[in-house]
Image (cartoon, helix red, strand yellow):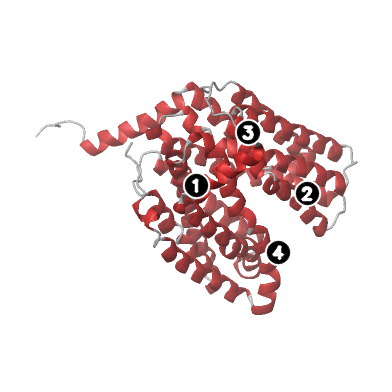
């Protein structure tokens, strides 16, 4: 018999790819996407450049830790202010100004490095400026997609944004290492500054409908309103509690003890680089898949994909060979990519736009608050009881917390409409 036509599944598949392409064809979203992606190209290289910039001055590892801490603290302390501002004024403007501030900080940082005048205190100050700008950028970024695309396109929009982050995360550190060798850390910092400026140019061209926000009496009142919206949604605050403990009990041990395991039993730095690259590749795959696969039950899916951490921590604790650890890291990357896209889509769909930035700022503050604690204590604890018990504790916590979060009715019942 002759060909009777295209298979229905293939037609649907092509239709979904066409819908994804049409999203990028939208001028407003394309500019927004290019702005975000451009800034991430430089930012993915910045930690390597900053680390070598500090160490090239003859400073110690302690000084390096102080510089990175100086960047983290303002990004946490100022998050609530960033959420209030992004709900009061144009989110696009907040993002553009934050990009310009970050560009200025990186250019000054580069000038100090290139002229050999960088000191620890000045690098800490510039890192703090950049971290403070990020505190305003992030709540605005999270709340922007609903202003640009229709509700049924939010998952795809967040998948594109996830891809914009995942791809530089894979290649950026390696490229930065080569550039540092060829031209020095100052050159990479200049590249990062340029990427922020290009991002500001793209974002400045995004035309966003004017929001008719109600008149507000005070910043404190705004914070109270945001807090009321945050705590009124049990799926939000229970998720944030889990994320906070997850960052402390699972992610921090992986970040601190993973390199130690790689050094002692997997072959050294190149093995750790392989694990990191596998994780990034998994996030890329997740972004591509979510462009065409609709997830109806996002919160349940998030819980299930996060179980991939059980296999990653377990493979490190058991001392499995590098290929097994890399496969587990790939699965974790897929899980992280799915988690970010679906969590953002659920927030943007179910939380009113005029409070979305403030709710996001409370969420980010809570989720990140315990991460530094975990990073600080995991080393001493592992020295006391061993690396294996710390990793196995993370495995047990991941299993138990996942089971507990599934007991929340809103987690099980939350559904999103199909594409």
Q: Residue furthest right?
A: 117
x 45%, y 53%: residue: 235
Q: Picture coordinates of residue 401 (x, y %)?
A: 47, 65
The CA span between labels 2 and 3 is 47 Å
Task: Quadrant for residue 403, please give it.
Answer: bottom left
Q: Picture coordinates of residue 192 (x, y %)?
A: 70, 36
The nearer-to-camera label among 2 and 3 is 3
Q: Is residue 152 visible?
A: yes
Residue on which the image places disc 1: 340
Task: Quadrant for residue 222, please give it.
Answer: top right
Label 2 element class = helix
The CA span between labels 2 and 4 is 22 Å
Residue on which the image places disc 4: 376
Label 1 element class = helix
Upstream in the sequence, badge 4 or badge 3? 3
Q: Nearer the viewer, residue 305 or 147?
A: 147
Q: Neighbour class for label 4 at 10 Å: few (<14), some, many (≥20)?
A: few
The CA span between labels 2 and 1 is 30 Å
* Pointers 4 and 1 in contact (C-beta within 8 Å): no
Upstream in the sequence, badge 2 or badge 4? 2
Q: Neighbour class for label 2 at 10 Å: few (<14), some, many (≥20)?
A: some
Upstream in the sequence, badge 2 or badge 1? 2
Q: Neighbour class for label 1 at 10 Å: few (<14), some, many (≥20)?
A: some
x 62%, y 73%: residue: 387
* Pointers 2 and 1 in contact (C-beta within 8 Å): no
Q: Is residue 43 visible?
A: no
Residue on which the image places disc 3: 217
Residue on which the image places disc 2: 52
Q: Nearer the viewer, residue 93 or 89?
A: 89
């Amino acid at each position: 018999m002759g060909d009777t036509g295209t298979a229905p599944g293939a037609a649907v598949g092509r239709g979904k790819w066409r819908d994804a392409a049409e999203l990028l064809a939208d001028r407003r979203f394309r500019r927004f996407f290019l702005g975000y992606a451009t800034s991430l190209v430089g930012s993915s290289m910045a930690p390597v450049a900053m680390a070598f910039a500090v160490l090239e001055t003859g400073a110690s590892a302690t000084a390096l830790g102080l510089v990175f801490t100086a960047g983290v603290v303002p990004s946490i302390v100022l998050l609530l202010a960033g959420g209030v501002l992004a709900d009061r004024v144009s989110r696009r403007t907040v993002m553009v100004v934050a990009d310009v501030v970050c560009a200025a900080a990186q250019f000054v940082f580069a000038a100090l490095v290139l002229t050999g005048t960088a000191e620890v205190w000045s690098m800490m100050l510039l890192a703090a400026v950049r971290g403070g700008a990020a505190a305003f950028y992030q709540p605005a970024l999270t709340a922007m997609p609903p202003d640009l695309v229709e509700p049924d396109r939010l998952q795809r929009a967040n998948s594109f944004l996830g891809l914009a982050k995942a791809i530089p995360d894979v290649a950026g550190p390696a490229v930065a290492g080569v550039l540092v060798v060829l031209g020095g850390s100052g050159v990479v910092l200049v590249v990062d500054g340029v990427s922020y400026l290009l991002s500001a140019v793209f974002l400045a061209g995004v035309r966003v409908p004017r929001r008719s926000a109600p008149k507000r009496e005070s910043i404190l009142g705004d914070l109270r309103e945001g807090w009321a919206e945050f705590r009124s949604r049990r799926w939000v605050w229970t998720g944030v509690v889990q994320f906070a403990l997850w960052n402390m009990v699972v992610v921090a041990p992986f970040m601190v003890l993973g390199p130690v395991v790689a050094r002692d039993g997997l072959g050294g730095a190149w093995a750790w680089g392989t694990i990191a690259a596998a994780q990034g590749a998994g996030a890329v795959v997740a972004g591509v898949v979510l462009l065409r696969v609709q997830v109806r039950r996002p919160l349940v899916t998030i819980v299930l994909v996060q179980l991939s951490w059980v296999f990653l921590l377990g493979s490190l604790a058991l001392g499995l060979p590098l290929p097994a650890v890399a496969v587990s890291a790939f699965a974790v990357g897929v899980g992280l990519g799915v988690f970010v896209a679906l969590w953002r889509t659920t927030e943007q769909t179910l939380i009113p736009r005029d409070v979305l930035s403030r709710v996001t700022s409370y969420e980010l503050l809570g989720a990140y608050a315990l991460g530094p604690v975990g990073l600080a204590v995991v080393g001493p604890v592992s020295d006391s009881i061993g690396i294996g018990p710390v990793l196995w504790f993370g495995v047990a916590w991941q299993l138990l917390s996942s089971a507990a979060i599934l007991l929340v009715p809103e987690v099980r019942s939350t559904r999103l409409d199909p594409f």
